[in-house]
Image (cartoon, grey):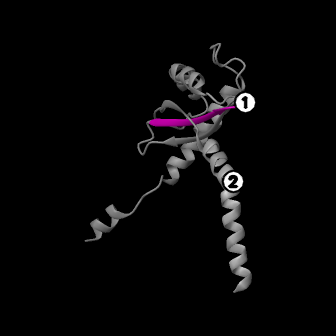
Amino acid sequence: MAMQRKEGRAKGPSQRQLSVGEMVRHALAGILQRQEIDDPTLHDALVTVSEVRMSPDLKIATAYVTVLGKSDTEPYVKALNHAARYLRGRLAPSLRQMKTMPELRFRTDESFENSAKIDALLRSPEVARDLDHDDDDGENA
């Protein structure tokens, strides 16, 4: 019976996954800041690594990136994925304590875009009107 309770619970990343993910994020950010990748797509791009999620076995690191001032990040993500093996090798000095270097995967971080959409919705006239109605109801009570 105890086994069923464990399976039913949603489980987030372990402390080790979070810690290693942050170390990988920091090391990747340094490499990207120094523009160590010889790819013309990335030369003038300001790439930010907002989060790195590690697989439970720490063998895969998925890095979520944004590119300052660019709405279409797909060419940059493609260039980063193309350079993933090189970047993996460049991570080795920063992650000496790890048994194996994780495989790198890059994805577009859509959290900022989603936040902007939610913010725009909250500022829309329809929501403002509904909020005004809620305030009126609160004053009468």
Residue 33, picture quadrant: top right
Which residue is outermost to the bottom?
Answer: 141
- Image quarter hosting the C terminus: bottom right
Region of the chain picked out in magenta, as a range:
60-68
Q: Nearer the viewer, residue 32 or 114?
A: 114
- Note whether 122 is above or below 48 in the view shown: below
Q: The disc labelled 1 sits on which kind of residue?
A: Gly
Q: Residue at x 64, y 43 (%)?
A: 112
- Image quarter hosting the N terminus: bottom left
Q: Give neighbour class at mark 2: few <14, some 14-19, many 20+ (Cα, 10 Å).
A: few
Q: Which mark is residue 69?
A: 1
Q: CA distance from mark 1 to mark 2?
A: 24 Å
Mark 1 element type: loop
Q: The disc labelled 2 sits on which kind of residue?
A: Ser
Q: Residue at x 62, y 14 (%)?
A: 39
Residue 80, picture quadrant: top right
Residue bearing mark 2:
124
Q: Earlier in the sequence, mark 1 or mark 2?
A: 1
Whole-percent x and y of residue 65?
Answer: 61, 34
Q: Residue at x 65, y 30 (%)?
A: 71
Nearest to viewer (mark 1 / mark 2) = 2
Residue 97 counted in the magenta span: no
The secondary structure making up most of the magenta span is strand
Q: Nearer the viewer, residue 64 or 90?
A: 64
